[in-house]
Image: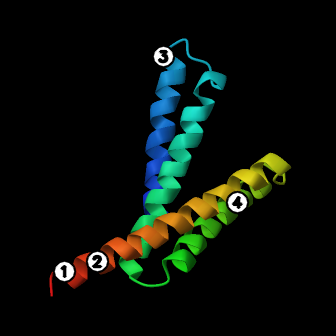
Amino acid sequence: MYGLIFILVFAVLSSLIFAFILRFTSAKEVSLQYIITALSFIGLFGGGFLSGGKHKENGWLIGGLTGLIYSLAVFLFQYLGYDRLFNVEQVIYHTCYTLIAMMGGILGVNISTNNSRRSV
């Protein structure tokens, strides 16, 4: 749950910052596309990392579930709110989001486990 909350807060803050940038500068959304994608990956990695670190085992599973729940929430928002399904590009993005969250979960478990071993 902590990982999903982190992802949500990170996404809201990033969206707010980019909304201000797009509103008050001459920047176009197309020119910020790669930066927004990179920040999405960072947010999902951080959420997976936090989830894996809190759970302390099965990081790949916990991170993967975090990424899948995020993707499911986005899918439901898009389908119920805009009556649109994922296209092929979005399926690829959300598959990568899940894989990134898995990697974050694995690293979170390994770092939290290594820290607890040293302190004993």
**What is the number of the mark on residue 110?**
none
Label 1 to label 2, Cα distance in Å? 6 Å
Name the quarter where the C terminus is drawn: bottom left
> What residue is at 66 percent from the left and 24 percent from the top?
30
Q: Which mark is residue 24?
A: 3
Query: Gap between marks 4 and 2, in whole Å?
Result: 29 Å
Q: Residue at x 54, y 63 (%)?
A: 101
Q: Mark 1 is on which residue type?
A: Arg
Kindly check if marks 3 and 1 are in contact, taking CB atoms under 8 A apart as contact: no
The mark lying in front, picked from 3 and 4, is 4
**Mark 2 and mark 3: Cα distance apart in space:** 46 Å
Q: Would residue 54 appear left or right of 8 to someone viewing this image?
A: left
Residue located beneath label 4 in the image: 95
For disc 3, the neighbor class at 10 Å (few under 14, some 14 to 19, many from 20) is: few
Q: Mark 3 or mark 1, which is nearer to you?
A: 1
State the SS at label 3: helix
Q: Residue at x 24, y 76 (%)?
A: 115
Type of the residue with mark 3: Phe
> Along the polypeptide, which appears first: circle 3 or circle 1?
3
Task: Quickly name the residue at label 2.
Answer: 114
The x and y percentages for residue 49 are: 43, 66
Give the label, 1 or 4, closer to the camera. 1
Q: Secondary structure at mark 2?
A: helix
Q: Residues within 10 Å of mark 2 (few under 14, many from 20)?
A: few
Q: Secondary structure at mark 1?
A: helix
Look at the picture and state if 107 lies above or below 89.
below
Numbered circle sitting on residue 118:
1
- Pointer 2 or 3: first along the chain: 3
Relative horizontal placement of residue 69, taking residue 1 as reference (left or right): right
The amino acid type found where label 2 is placed reads: Asn
Q: Are marks 1 and 2 in contact (CB under 8 Å)?
A: yes
